Image (tube, helix red, strand yellow):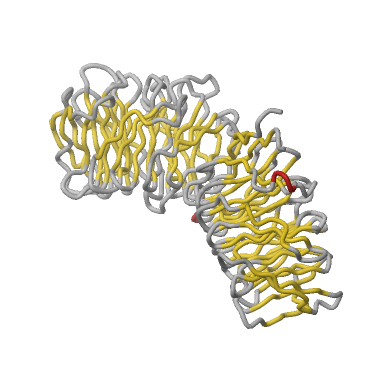
Amino acid sequence: MAAPTITIDRIFGAVPATTRGQPTQISADSKGQRLAYAAGKSIFVRSIDNPVDCKEYTGHTAATTVARFAPNGFKVASGDASGMLHVWEPETIESTRGEYGIIAGRLNDIAWDGDSQRIIAVGDGKEQFGRCITADSGNSVGEIIGHSKSVNAVAMKAQRPFRAATVGDDGNMVFYHGAPYKFHSKTESHKSFALSAAYSPDGSILVSVGADKRIQLYDGKTGEPTKQIGEGEHTGSIFSVAWSQDGKKFTTASADRTVKLWDADAGTVIQTWTFGDAVRDQQVGVVIPHGRTDGLIISLNLDGELSYLTEGKDAPIKVVQGHNKGVTALGGGSDGSLWSGSFDGRVCHWDVKTGSSTTVYGQQHSNQVTQFASGDGKTYSVGWDDTLRTVDEAAKTFLGESTPLTGQPKDSSSSNGNLYVATATGVAIYADGKLVKEHSLNYTPGAIATSGSNVAVGADNNSVKIYQTDSSGSLQETKTVTNPTGTITALAFSRAGSHLAAGNSVGKIYVYKSDSWDLVVDRWSAHTSRVTCIDWDTSGAYAASGSLDTNVFVWCLEKKNHGKRIKAPNTHKDGVYGIRWVDSGKVASAGGDCTVKVWNVQNLP
């Protein structure tokens, strides 16, 4: 028989990470096929037309801030909050070609020259605000000087004679001649922070935009200011600017919640797209992917949503949604879909077959989502804002008002129409979103799982306390089982309720038979850190687990294979926080890298 394997099936990618008051860079390749952007400690490369086609580069150790395709499309340069620049190939995404320290601080932007050989990277340095290097060796090929404050953006002319421009918080545009790149001139172009700059594809025009709502054009070869356009059009900071491939148009994205398409020659607005009326609708990044015939514009809002716009249509033709903070909870819907919740309180719904994501509409949690439980066409979420929220699965919206919890939730589970929430002080039982009964306990629960009338709670002294419950919601303690190694941090009954898996703080999992509470497995011990989540497949023969050690394991219950396991290593940077069997032979996981991933599990013993 072939050896068991676990391989990635698809990545439900993060959306770009954003920061209020700052531009967010999104980059398209020269063929108009892929986007690259930063989220968490990863860089994501996604197909524009099929966003489910997603790759994740995980070479950075600090929070990533920017990624840019080289003009030839064969390389990506990415930067992070520690000032490190990485050069890598999107096709062989696992290996890093170059790793260079640029500045002692956050990298804000990167630009490639037309030969795909030289890179200028800029940001919030201490001694210096950027460097110009060769992509293959990191050798210096010029200096970035002339700014007195952080540099926000850089643009490089693709044709000879080589030119480059940087703009920063001092309001200046600094112009360089190259290569090697040397300071040439400085223009006080903006009254406030200059936030973005871009060269027209033929190199004839440079444009800069900023917090003063100003759009400034320059001669691309000399750096001389030529004209200022759009006075009074934008009413908020302009965060980003991007050119069309023919150089006749450019687009701007603004804090005034609009994206505008401009006629470059006439200096007039061709079309304005207006989004919502909330802070989240501020538009903080924009790109016009070259190499396409549909004139597509992709704009990014403060929530990380990517809106696909086309000239002549008022509404986006597509909106890509997801998480841009670590995913802290994963649940399954009754229709085989997935629900995920993140550190910032956002709840998303995932169609496993298509990979499409919908952010649940309505009042989101205001803090970390802890757990999901499903039943009767509804999904319940609990979060660190100490509330219980009910989601209508079909409409993908939160129903009614949130229900206050009796304390901060540690975990939740549903059975027989009731929702059991383990809080810092005990167990609270809810039906239809209303409190039925509250049980104070003399220990702080670490986890909870339910099956029929059995309620298992992770207790003190490395123990699991087993309770029986009745229709009134009362809990009667019937049994205590203990393990010799660690505090209980995750519990899961098999679907039929015949077995209980208990994971602990040192990475071990013990399995008990629920009719006798005899220990039947004590060899599931491959995790090296706290077990955060466990889920059984529908047959009850296999369980999957995730841990802070970033690994996912699939285990076999059958006696002769007790110690056997298959491993998916380094599945999520910063830890795995959710696991769910979604199909026969498929496991979904979620974690600190802001993603949900689906794995193919084959040839199980």
143 or 298: nearer the eye? 143
x and y, in percent, of residue 567 in the image? 58, 41
In this view, 70 is above or below 461: above
Image quadrant assignment for residue 179: top left
Q: Is residue 257 left or right of residue 455?
A: left
x and y, in percent, of residue 233 in the image? 41, 43
**Image quarter hosting the C terminus:** top right
x and y, in percent, of residue 556 in the image? 70, 46
- What is the count of numbered marks? 0
53 or 413: nearer the eye? 413
573 or 465: nearer the eye? 465
Q: Residue at x 27, y 29 (%)?
A: 119
In this view, 111 is above or below 362: above
Q: Is residue 6 left or right of residue 140?
A: right
x and y, in percent, of residue 253 in the image? 43, 41
Q: Residue at x 22, y 39 (%)?
A: 130
Q: Is residue 215 visible?
A: no
Q: Is residue 174 visible?
A: yes
